[in-house]
């Protein structure tokens, strides 16, 4: 039996497109196949924005699936992403989450790499194998593409070019989250481990927002018009009007929810690229949520926040106050999401299927036309996942 | 710290005790009572603090924000949160007089949490408090309590101040 056959045998997908087997969140056996087909497969994964490593020698460590990697700003201004491993015996080269180095030295046998990944030193090489050539021992580099300063990586040479992969309905709003021109400045991180399978983390939908988030009602945020656009390969883009109330009685300091942007028509943008990255511009917060599954259980999320290089001091201060209090693992708005990720995971240890209802017109058809507050927008993601994993859909 | 008067140390220790008891009993009004009217509260990752990044997990930079923190915990997030109880352990490490009955104090902290749905106890975070404390007739209040957590990756979302 081939590996694909074995995976198919693990799970049969329900015949109805609006049903997802709860077991998909709980089966540890799926993880190796998810690594192979999704994290090391033909998908793009954002790793770093230039604003996070703005100077030559700046680096940032990350993970792709279970593989340690790091991004480096080279002397030539280029940003490259390498596997975090010495090409000699495999020792990890970078041990801090971020920093600045002139070169990368492996402590084991002092092999030395420059910022461009070239091997520039290896002691006692006269005793190496006869055909040894330093050129063959450069750091393994990942295929990379940049969009408005944000660098994506992929392990596959079959992944389509990035803009084609994202589609215009996704990359146009993404450009606005990235400040309209990519000229961002990092203002800090919030990092947290959520106690759930990675798929529970990225199964948030358009239906829940006005219902789960009590803050929305208290702040009179309900009723703004908007759209949800989904793509066949599992990306979602929510664009919503910010309907700001003149008077907010729930807060003593309502300045925390001021919107200082120029138009409320697109005051809220939330994007989710397959498989698991969220990008948001909610009010004046510019946020990329890098996410790193810790195997089949647990996901580490790094909320990176940005200001724009043209912001004045007052605007930067406003972004800091807003970002530090509204989003992230303690935020007034998004902490409730965090609670649900964990509760989904616990509840899905029961048998049966999760059932999507809001916005589903035909249970046996996949529909890419969805409304702003529909949960059916998640179904193309699930269908893309099912196909990647090779699960057979039951006949109706 | 040997040159700091005993009654000053006592006032500061009493304030810290009131603070951690307020959080361990989840009495947010008692937590608020630990701050002066010009008080601020910050909960920030050590990584951000060290690298000069201002983003915090919680940033209450005026008294009204402190009041809103009470509202958030007591009224807004109550029904969705997986609640937990905490035990704060603290150790006073320094007091430096700043003049005019104001002092800079440092504490180490370690905080355990017990989640109510599974009754398991784990470490929530470890770090240090950097405080500015004003004492008026032996009553101390925080002008600043800044919790800098060495636990840069939180083990769960945090629903209450630390």
Image (tube, coloured by chain):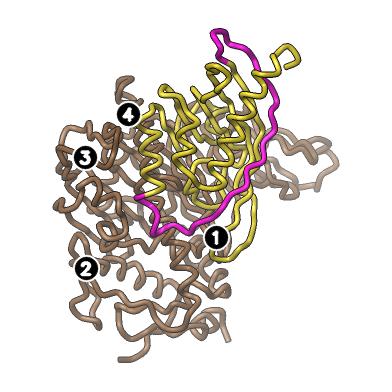
Q: Is residue A384 magenta?
A: no
The secondary structure type at the circle numbered 4 is helix
Q: Position of residue A362 (x, y in %)?
A: 20, 80
Q: CA distance from mark 1 to mark 3?
A: 37 Å
Respond whether the residues carrying marks 2 and 3 are from the same subunit.
yes
The residue pinned by badge 3 equals A248
Seen from the viewer's position, the closer of residues A280 and A87 is: A280
Q: Earlier in the sequence, mark 1 or mark 3?
A: 3
In the picture as drawn, the residue positioned furthest to the front comes out as B137
Q: CA distance from mark 4 to mark 2?
A: 37 Å
Q: Residues within 10 Å of mark 4 (few under 14, many from 20)?
A: many
Q: Residues within 10 Å of mark 3 (few under 14, many from 20)?
A: some
Q: Earlier in the sequence, mark 1 or mark 4?
A: 1
* For discs 3 and 4, the disc positioned in front in the rendered view: 3
The reply to whether the C-beta atoms of the residues labelled 2 and 3 are less than 8 Å apart is no
> What residue do we see at 19% from left, 66% from top?
A370
The residue pinned by badge 2 equals A368
Residue A182 falls in which quadrant of the image?
top left
Chain A appears what colour? brown
* For discs 2 and 1, the disc positioned in front in the rendered view: 1
Is residue A183 at least partly visible in the picture? no
The reply to whether the C-beta atoms of the residues labelled 3 and 4 are less than 8 Å apart is no
**Viewport quadrant of the C terminus of chain A:** bottom left
Q: Judge whether B101 appears above or below A250 on screen.
A: above
């Amino acid at each position: 039996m081939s590996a694909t056959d074995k995976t198919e045998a693990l799970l049969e997908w329900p015949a109805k497109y609006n049903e997802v087997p709860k077991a998909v969140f709980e089966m540890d056996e799926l993880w190796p196949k998810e690594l192979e087909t999704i994290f090391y497969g033909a998908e793009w994964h954002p790793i770093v924005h230039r604003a996070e490593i703005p100077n030559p020698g700046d680096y940032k460590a990350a993970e792709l699936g279970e593989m340690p990697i790091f991004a480096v700003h080279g002397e030539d201004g280029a940003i490259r992403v390498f596997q975090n491993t010495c090409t000699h015996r495999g020792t990890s080269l970078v041990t801090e989450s971020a920093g600045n180095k002139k070169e990368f030295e492996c402590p084991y046998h002092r092999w030395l790499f420059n910022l461009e990944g070239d091997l520039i030193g290896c002691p006692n090489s006269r005793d190496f194998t006869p055909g040894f050539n330093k050129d063959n021992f450069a750091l393994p580099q990942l295929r990379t593409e940049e969009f408005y300063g944000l660098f994506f990586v992929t392990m596959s040479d079959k992944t389509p070019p990035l803009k084609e992969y994202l589609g215009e309905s996704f990359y146009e709003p993404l450009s606005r989250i990235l400040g309209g021109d990519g000229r961002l400045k990092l203002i800090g991180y919030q990092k947290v481990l959520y106690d759930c399978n990675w798929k529970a983390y990225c199964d948030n939908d358009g239906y829940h927002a006005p219902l789960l988030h009590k803050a929305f009602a208290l702040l009179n945020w309900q009723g703004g018009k908007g759209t949800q656009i989904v793509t066949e390969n599992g990306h979602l883009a929510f664009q919503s009007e910010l309907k700001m109330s003149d008077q907010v009685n729930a807060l003593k300091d309502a300045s925390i929810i001021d919107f200082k942007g120029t138009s409320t028509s697109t005051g809220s943008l939330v994007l989710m690229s397959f498989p698991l990255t969220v990008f948001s511009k909610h009010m004046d917060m510019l946020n990329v949520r890098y996410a790193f599954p810790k195997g089949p259980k647990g996901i580490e999320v790094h909320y990176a926040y940005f200001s724009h290089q043209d912001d004045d001091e007052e605007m930067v201060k406003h972004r800091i106050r807003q970002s530090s209090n509204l989003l992230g693992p303690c935020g007034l708005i998004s902490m409730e999401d965090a609670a649900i990720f964990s509760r989904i995971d616990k509840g899905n240890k029961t048998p049966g299927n999760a059932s999507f209802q809001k916005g589903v017109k035909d249970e046996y058809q996949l529909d890419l036309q969805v409304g702003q507050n529909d949960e059916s927008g998640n179904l193309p993601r699930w269908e893309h996942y099912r196909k990647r994993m090779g699960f057979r859909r039951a006949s109706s | 710290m040997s040159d700091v008067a005993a009654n000053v140390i006592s006032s500061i220790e009493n304030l810290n005790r009131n603070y951690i008891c307020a959080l361990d009993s989840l009495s947010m009004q008692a937590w608020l009572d630990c701050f002066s009217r010009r008080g601020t509260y910050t909960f920030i990752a050590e990584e951000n603090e060290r690298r000069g990044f201002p983003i915090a997990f919680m940033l209450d930079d005026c008294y009204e924000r402190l009041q809103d923190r009470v509202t958030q915990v007591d009224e807004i997030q109550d029904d969705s949160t997986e609640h937990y109880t905490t035990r704060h352990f603290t150790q006073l490490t320094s007091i430096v007089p700043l003049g005019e009955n104001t002092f800079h104090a440092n504490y180490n902290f370690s905080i355990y949490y017990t989640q109510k749905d599974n009754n398991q106890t784990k470490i929530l975070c470890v770090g240090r408090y950097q405080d500015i404390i004003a004492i008026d007739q032996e009553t101390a209040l925080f002008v600043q309590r800044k919790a800098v957590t060495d636990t840069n990756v939180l083990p769960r979302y945090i629903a209450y101040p630390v």
